[in-house]
Amino acid sequence: MRTKKTLLLTFLLLSFAIFTAKSENYPPQIANDSTGQSQVLTPQQSKTSGSVTIAGKRIDYDATAGTLILKNQKNKPTISMSYVAYLKKGESNKANRPITFIYNGGPGSSSSWLHMASWGPQIFDIEDLQYAKAPFKTKNNDNSLLDASDLVFIDAPGTGFGQIITKEMGGAGTREDFFGTDQDGMAFANFIYEYITENNRWNSPKYLFGESYGTLRSPVVARDLQRMGISLNGIIQLSQLLSYMNASRAIPENPGADLNYVLMFPTYAATAYYHNKTAHQSTDLETFLKEVEDFTAHQYATALSKGVNLDDATKQQVAQKMHEYTGLPINYLLKANLRVKQPQFTQNLLGDKNQITGRLDTRFTGDAINPLSENAQYDPMGAHTGAALSAVLNTYFRETLKFGEGMHYKTSGNVRPWKYTRRGEFGFPNVMGDLAETMIVNPTMKVMVNSGYFDLSTPYYQGKYEMAHLLIPKHIYENIEFKYYQAGHMVYLHPESFKELHDNVADFIKRSY
């Protein structure tokens, strides 16, 4: 039983990666120079310059693509982590210029999405909701965050151009040193410590920007940095998840726990609204969702809490309201005992057309592989955008950043098995205590939560619930702010929301130092 549970939980963690590449099928990750000497033990760097136009204003920058080597207490190298840094010319050497450390999630995802689809000076050029095909192009990023902060994109251990430096390579690293909740967080904290030391950025205002699993990573990194004597000005969360117990994919591992259904339901309703399936189409989305949230927090949550003791009349009434908000048939909702799992919802909402919706972004649709299946069998969002991102990323590194020749960039890494237990805990990772500790010890630090209404991977209502349940004094809770967008998990894929996201984050940085 323990082995089975471990396997299921490991799969659960990996399900938050956008893609699941098997790195064991990749060629060896060591680049060799002309003498055959392995370069993995030596930090690599390529420095270039460029410019980006944001809001009509040109910003010149210096870019560094490379690897940074971490060592253990015996000064033995353990891992190389790859990164790209963009520093605004003329200001970057000043200690008061903000610097933001940016990473995606997974666990086991590189920073490729936030780099080449969100905050970098060049991003891939695709139309929203359209299936992209080669040849792919990049374009100037009108919404790059370089106007507000210097940017350092960090690839997680086992991804990008980095790799673990094992004993056979002349190091002392092992997979167990990095592939776990606490181990991964410490690696990022050590990277940031080394980076600000090497680049004289100790006195710069510092920010963490994480997406998806990166939002679970940030409280761990912040706690570790604080214990190293490094305080942050802010943590910026995009598509937040602080406890895997609250994750939509955790339902099979939590029979009898109904909170997951409650936290997902407003996103079901938002998705139905987008696809014209609700009985409330004449109401604007935000007003509609306020009504849905009230129903969710009271009638729906109360009904589920009663379990088998829920009377038939109330069950029928709740199913009727769920039907009005989602368009799902009443008989289907009753058969599901008012508990519709995420893959069932994405399979059935557009079942009359033999189509499915996305999980990461429910605006996306695709044809069902098996219209008779209970669950959706793929995510249309990944199918629409994945190839374009990989193509432009690999081209951009080699042609623009002049880095990575003869090396292989892993957009996703094989991080299994992942150690999800931490510091004596058991079961699902939960970093709410880490964030609470950091906010109490550093009461000037601000936290910003950004969420898309159409995200079923990390539903927006889940982020709202988690932050409302942090064990912090109410006056410190005032340091938290929320922003919501008519987009999915990758808010930046929706053009209008991307502009809002940039303006909100840039303003947050300017207000918090």
Image: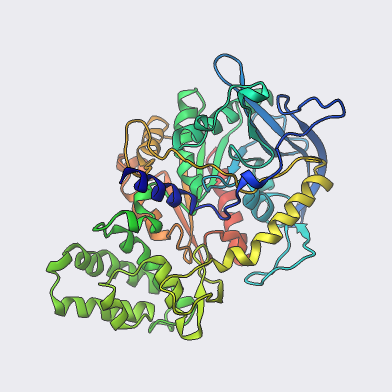
The residue drawn where x is 77% and y is 35% is: 90
Q: Residue furthest right?
A: 34
Q: In the visual, does 333 lie left or right of 71?
A: left
Tell me if I can see residue 197 in this picture.
yes
Give the image location of residue 351, x and y in percent.
45, 81
Q: Residue at x 60, y 59 (%)?
A: 492
Q: How is the image coloured?
A: rainbow
In the image, is residue 424 above or below residue 296? above
Count of numbered circles in the view: 0
- Looking at the image, the residue that sits furthest to the top is 74
Give coordinates of residue 5: x percent, y percent. 35, 47
Q: Where in the figure is residue 448, as x and y percent of width and height?
A: 48, 48
Image quadrant where one finds the C terminus: top right
Residue appearing at x 80%, y 40% in the figure: 406
Which of these two is toward me, 319 or 253?
Answer: 253
Q: Is residue 41 above or below residue 274?
A: above
Query: Dividing the picture into quarters, in which one does residue 60 lie?
Result: top right
Determine if residue 54 is in view. no
- Out of 193 and 398, give the one closest to the viewer: 398
Q: Is residue 165 above or below residue 323?
A: above
Rendering coords of residue 66 (x, y %): 73, 35
Residue 138 is drawn in which quadrant?
bottom right
State left or right for residue 77 relative to residue 12: right
